Amino acid sequence: MARHAMYPGSFDPITNGHVDVIKRAAQLFDRVTVVIAVNSKKTPMFTEDERKDMATEALQHLPNVQVAVHSGLIVDFAEENQVDVIIRGLRAVSDFEYEFQIALMNRKLQPHVSTIFMMPHEQYTYLNSSIIRELGRYQQDISAFVPAGVSRRMKERHGS
């Protein structure tokens, strides 16, 4: 049976930590859908289309990975797209409590969809999109932390 996993997030922007988790997920599952989720609590720097384009470019080397945008509940996307597993990234212990609560609620809403937690490589544990956006605002070199297309777009956005 083909196993389909999804990795949801705002990806504003996608980082090398995200790419690391996605690359490893692509080795474990037949299909991985990266879902650009619309988070009502966040005001993104990049539009949904820009985030989708950056993720698609960064992941083009992974043939079993696709990118989609979804504005509803993640478990609804899972149900509509026959997703078996939701992947959630954990950088630190501080991420676990929130992610655990979400996983339990998702299980309550869609009992047949499992959640797995994956950690990025330790070189990315301190990295998140908020830090990247802040560095970009101050025209710092972010090329070691994000895919080349993201670095280029951040430079264009901030005029450096």
Image (tube, helix red, strand yellow):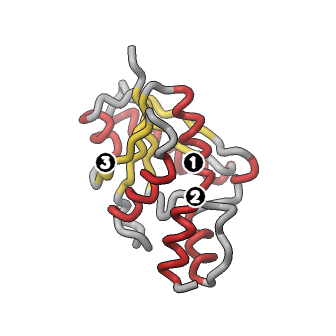
Residue at figure coordinates x 38%, y 56% from the top left: 52
The amino acid sitting under disc 2 is: Pro
Residue at figure coordinates x 28%, y 34% from the top left: 81
Circles 1, 3 touching at the beta carbon (< 8 Å): no
Name the secondary structure under disc 1: helix
Name the secondary structure under disc 2: loop
Viewer-nearest of discs 3 and 2: 2
The amino acid sitting under disc 3 is: Leu
Q: Which residue is labeled 2 in the image?
A: 147
Q: Is residue 3 above or below residue 149?
A: above
Q: Which residue is labeled 3 in the image?
A: 73
Viewer-nearest of discs 1 and 2: 2
Residue 36 appears at what percent x and percent y? 38, 53
Task: Please name whichever residue, 61 or 98, is drawn nearer the observer in this view of the structure.
Answer: 61
Residue 159 appears at what percent x and percent y? 53, 86
Q: Quadrant of the C terminus?
A: bottom right
Q: Is residue 83 above or below residue 76?
A: above
Residue 43 appears at what percent x and percent y? 40, 72
Check disc 2: other Cα within 10 Å, few if <14, some if 14-19, many if 20+.
many
Residue at figure coordinates x 39%, y 38% from the top left: 106
Q: Which residue is labeled 1 in the image?
A: 19
Q: Please tell me which of labels 1 and 3 falls first in the chain.
A: 1
